[in-house]
Image (cartoon, helix red, strand yellow):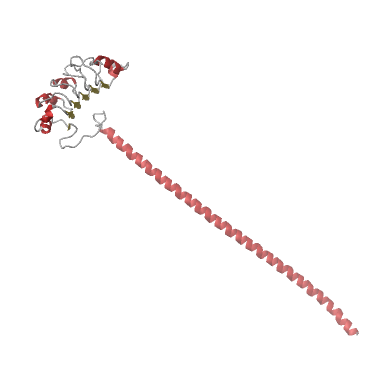
Amino acid sequence: MEMKKRLTLELRNKKPSEVKELVLDNCRSDDGKICGLSSDFENLEFLSMINVNLLSVSNLPKLSKLRKLELSDNRISCGLEVLAEKTPNLTHLNLSGNKIKDFTTLEPLKKLPHLRSLDLFNCEVTMLINYRESVFALLPQLTYLDGFDASDKEAPDSDPEADGLDDDYDENGEEGEEEDEEDEEELDEDAVDDEEDEDDLDGEEEEDGVEDEEEEDEEEGEDEDDDEGEEDIQHGEKRKRELEDEGEEDPEDEEDEEDD
């Protein structure tokens, strides 16, 4: 598919000024040059033109907000000074798989003060002696070359600066994580307090149950004592009546004996 047609499809009825990311990989360029792309894409931040048979970037329009440019697997061999003029805020540049053979071809990149990452995989320049040391010396603003810094430390998978994020975002993100952890700890403490309250309630209920049982036993004991007392009183009264009856009969018997 031609680059112009691909551009039309990628727009999807949007205005060029509304587009921030544009991918034109594997389409066909006209005579090895960029076509269809204009300065109307004024808010474009990411542009990918991988394997489009580019020989030059001379037709690249002014894209002041562009930060990432993917140009790998083309046939670019020179003319990088255009990048310094048209993309002054570029931070990431991928030129892997192109025809760059010497350090002098890279010299125009010194005019890109914000360039942090440069990829030159599968370019002939990578075969030169002291390749990495020479490129870092030529471009002191670089942090990563072919995915590693000057100390051979690998670049992170995502770069907040390249993704349009700043340090404040990272700090806020860390603060958010800390707040989440604090909230979780508070929830755990509340759960423990609730369990302790439940245990206290259970203990109080058990104590109340024991006290109730003891009171019932005491009441039953008192009832039994009262019953026994009443029985003793009744028995005593009965005995008293019997003795009184016997006392009344004795005088009569004595009189009968005297008459005889």
- In the figure, 168 relative to 23: above or below? below
Q: Is residue 239 left or right of residue 47?
A: right
Residue drawn at x 47%, y 49% as measured from the top left: 197
Image location of residue 109, percent across then percent down: 14, 25
Image location of residue 76, percent across then percent down: 15, 21
Residue drawn at x 91%, y 84% as measured from the top left: 259
Of 57 and 250, which appears nearest the observer? 57
Locate residue 128: give its quadrant. Answer: top left
Image location of residue 118, percent across then percent down: 17, 28
- In the figure, 151 relative to 20: above or below? below
Q: Quadrant of the C terminus?
A: bottom right
- In the figure, 254 relative to 55: above or below? below
Locate residue 34: give its quadrant. Answer: top left
Q: Quadrant of the N terminus?
A: top left
The count of marks equals 0
Residue drawn at x 28%, y 34% as measured from the top left: 170
Residue drawn at x 10%, y 27% as measured from the top left: 103
Q: Is residue 218 left or right of residue 148?
A: right
Image location of residue 107, percent across then percent down: 11, 25
Locate residue 7: give its quadrant. Answer: top left
Of 173 and 133, which appears nearest the observer? 133
